Image (cartoon, rainbow, N blue to C red):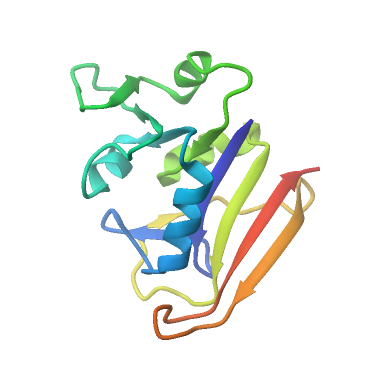
Amino acid sequence: MINIIAAIDKNFGIGYQNKLLFWLPNDLKRFKMLTTGHTIIMGRKTFESLPKGALPNRRNIVLSSNSDLNYPDTEIFSSLQEALTHCSANEQIYIIGGASVYKQALPIADTLCLTEVNANASKVDAYFPVIDKEIWHEKSRETHLADEKHPCSYSFVTYIRR
């Protein structure tokens, strides 16, 4: 099962200078809840943006064309396809970024686990691919209002392939 997980703004923005656009504690908790105990696949820049390196209690796979890379507690593959051949059929896989990895994974993903932020980030240099509603069906939506810890409203939305 290939899942894509991301937080996107109204214009599908996902990042700026290799950082998240919004600090939403509930989004981070949801990310941890969904991915813990499973495999996460990410590009090198996404991995390097993680403050403490490999995420604990997950199989961390990093995609890079640089075969000399070596990060603790990670596996490195040259492509998404190569990484997937090293995963078992019953493995829950979460694609966690960045933009080019999302673009490669979208045609083969089964589920999108998105946090749709009800705002436009002021600066964006990385975008999520457009979601084709002919291909993706909204399965569930859980909306949250802005509060003292969350500067804007957001929704946890799950899409499944039609």
Which quadrant holds residue 46? top left
Residue 34 on image: x %, y %? 53, 46
| Left or right placement of residue 112 versus residue 77 in this view | right
Closer to the camera in the image, 87 or 137:
87
Q: Name the residue at 23% across, 42% down.
A: 48
Closer to the camera in the image, 52 or 98:
52
| Left or right placement of residue 138 versus residue 131 in this view | right
Q: Tally the marks.
A: 0
Which quadrant holds residue 148? bottom left
Q: Name the residue at 44% across, 50% down.
A: 32
Work out whether 145 lies above or below 101. below
Residue 79 on image: x %, y %? 42, 22
Work out whether 60 lies above or below 81. below
Location of the N terminus by quadrant is: top right
| Left or right placement of residue 90 versus residue 34 in this view | right
Location of the C terminus by quadrant is: top right
Work out whether 144 lies above or below 20. below
Residue 113 on image: x %, y %? 59, 51
Residue 127 on image: x %, y %? 46, 55
Q: Name the residue at 43% across, 40% down.
A: 100
